[in-house]
Amino acid sequence: MEPILMKIYEYYSGEDREMLLRAFTFASNAHKDQKRASGEPYFIHPCAVAEILVDLGLDAATIAGALLHDVIEDTPATEEDIRREFGEEVLTLVSGVTKLDKIVFKSQEEEEAENFRKIFIAMAKDIRVIIIKLADRLHNMRSLNFLSKDRQQKMAQETLDIYAPIAGRLGISQVKCELEDLCLKYLDPEAFEFLVENIHQKLEERNRFVDFVVEEINAILQESNISGEVFGRPKHFYSIYKKMKTKGRTLDQIYDLTALRVIVGTVDECYEVMGKIHMKWKPVPGRIKDYIATPKPNMYQSLHTTVVTNFGQPFEIQIRTEEMHRTAEYGIAAHWKYKEHRDNETSLDQRISWIREMMDLQGGFRDSKEFMNSVKEELYSNELLVFTPHSKVISLPEKATPVDFAYAIHSEVGNRCTGAKVNGKIVPLDSTLELGDVVEIITSPTSKGPSRDWLKFVKSPSARAKIKYFFRKAMREDNIKLGRTMLEDFAKRKGYQLSEILTPDSFKKISEKFSFDTQDEMFSAIGFGAVSTSQIYFKLVDYFRKEVPLPVLQPFKERNAKGTVTIKGMTGLLVSFAGCCSPVPGDDIVGYVTRGRGVVVHRRDCPNLKNAEEDRLQPAEWTGEGVTDARFKAGLVVTAEDQGAALASISTVLADMKLTLTSINGRYDKNGAAIVEVTVSLLNKQDIEVLINRLSSRDKIISVRRMSN
């Protein structure tokens, strides 16, 4: 019998077992004849992922999701098949993992950042999705030797940067430690082999020492009439490697290769045992940490102390209760594993509140890259523990300020903050807090909100996001108007009306990529700068081009108010002239077949045609008939030594030629030259050529050319 089947029979019963057996059969049939890179049957992988999760104690729906996590992506099975056979809950998990599986971390920073954001969206919706993904990544890392060296290193680095920290933040230390060791194996194989060989050589000596210490602590427990368990656990290779790197030590200088753990019944017994250990062996100053009174953000609790034996060898001892030990080993997974001690849903929400807070505030970040950097700060930051006046512990990043503290209390406290006291004394808001400080925030109901200057010194990603969110929300209406105008103008410059490319269907496609709920939210994001105008425009146009069919082409000659143009191969369509290059009679022209707006005539040298689809370009020519009666607008760019000379020359030459100026704009370039852009009303190309020649001959005029936007 398959190992996973044995575990299903052992740990699940009733309807849960029946569903898991059906999921096993369904996935087995779906993956039939598929192979992994190793040549093994592909179905080995989902079975291994499911086994990891069974050992972590996850519920039946999660195990079913693990068995089925690749069927939608890699087999003919559909979402409807999963929904029909296993229900909505399992489908949600499978779909969530499938979307994460589609993520490919590319070298481009923006793409990686956007994918990182998608991971956190999945985590916020159902934390079990990322737990399945962690198990999936763990098994892939275990079988990484079958891939090329480049892929091994890329996947190992991605795992070390993204997945191992997430496992640590969720408190699943088993998965975190194994992932880190596997990453080290591929990222620095020489160091990994060195550690394996040298630590193994000293294993017997270290085990004798550990046995001695365990015996001594057991004697302390017995004398104190405390029931408990004492054992040693070797530290994982990556933690030793990191200590050697960061502290510049050799392996011989690292004494705590094994951590002693003491598991007792109550919190009081934890403190009692630590006191008696300190009476027996001298504690190392600065190495006593109380994570029971001040738990880590991942809910880890334990007493840590490093002591020195009578013959001079230091070692670390961790003291905790059985419940704390479960949390330390399994983290958030303990919510499902230990059903008789299961936390309630409120406690689970508290454990993942930091994820939801980051997602709620993602609108305060300018882009996905800023979001990724902020979350990484949250994952990697060292802790600074300070207190409220009522002795509540607040965890902040190192070098945090009173403003960080205020926003950690509540968004409104931060927004209304006008001053701060640290240890009873008024301090500037940009002061650096120290470990153990007592901080009091002074607020005012008349405060107009945070200062933008605070963004220069706050350290916590949460505070930074809340400040930005305040300004974004306060200026929402302005951002909506600005964003709409920016997108409309950009579309017009490209030859489209926004109303024709922004439809309910095209917006739905945009919202799937950028997670917008409404068009106003999209416009606000553009105005705020969270997304660029071009990002939205090109997605809309791509969808528009796919959905609106090209017209049927037939021979046709078209008269336009500006003149007569023959478009070969066209009939029955509106003909208009492109504003970007302003063609006039005599210019070499070409017709561009738009979707829904007929044919737009461009100059053949127009830069906007550089990447045009060849099958949409149609030959065009001026017929000459009626051309002389029409007036055209043409743009010129005049470069001069100074604006005064440019303006004087332009006005003089236009007056001599009896031409009308319709618009003018001026600026200076980085070299100090004056750049003047003018639009002139004229009859044909000959007028333009005469105008260019006359302007070019004027004093202080450097160059004159036709304008192409």
Image: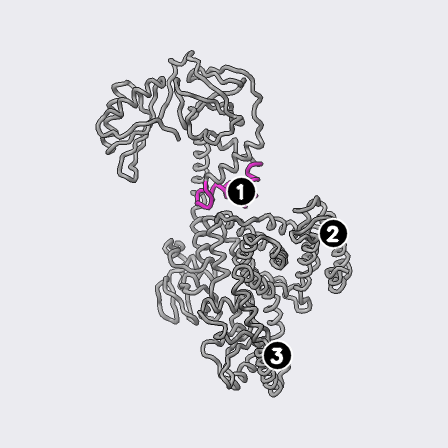
Amino acid type indicated by mark 3: Val
The residue sitting at 27% across, 34% down in the picture is 674
Specify few, some or many for label 1: CA neighbours under 10 Å numbering under 14, 14-19, or 20 or more: few
Q: Quadrant of the N terminus?
A: bottom right
Badge 3 vs badge 1, beta-carbon distance below 8 Å? no
The residue sitting at 35% across, 26% down in the picture is 706
Q: Nearer the viewer, mark 3 or mark 1?
A: 3
Camera-side residue of 297 and 262 = 262
Q: Is residue 28 above or below residue 206?
A: above
The residue sitting at 70% across, 48% down in the picture is 34
Q: Is residue 169 visible?
A: no
Q: Secondary structure at mark 1?
A: loop
Instruction: Name the colour scheme.
Output: one colour
Camera-side residue of 107 and 152 = 152
> Dot 3 corresponds to which residue?
230
Camera-side residue of 114 and 245 = 245
Q: Which residues are magenta?
A: 505-532
> Dot 1 corresponds to which residue?
518
Amino acid type indicated by mark 1: Thr
Q: Is residue 391 visible?
A: yes
> Dot 2 corresponds to which residue?
28
Instruction: Identify the mark nearer the N-term, 3 or 1.
Output: 3
Instruction: Identify the mark nearer the N-term, 3 or 2.
Output: 2
**Disc 3 and disc 2: Cα gap in Å?**
43 Å
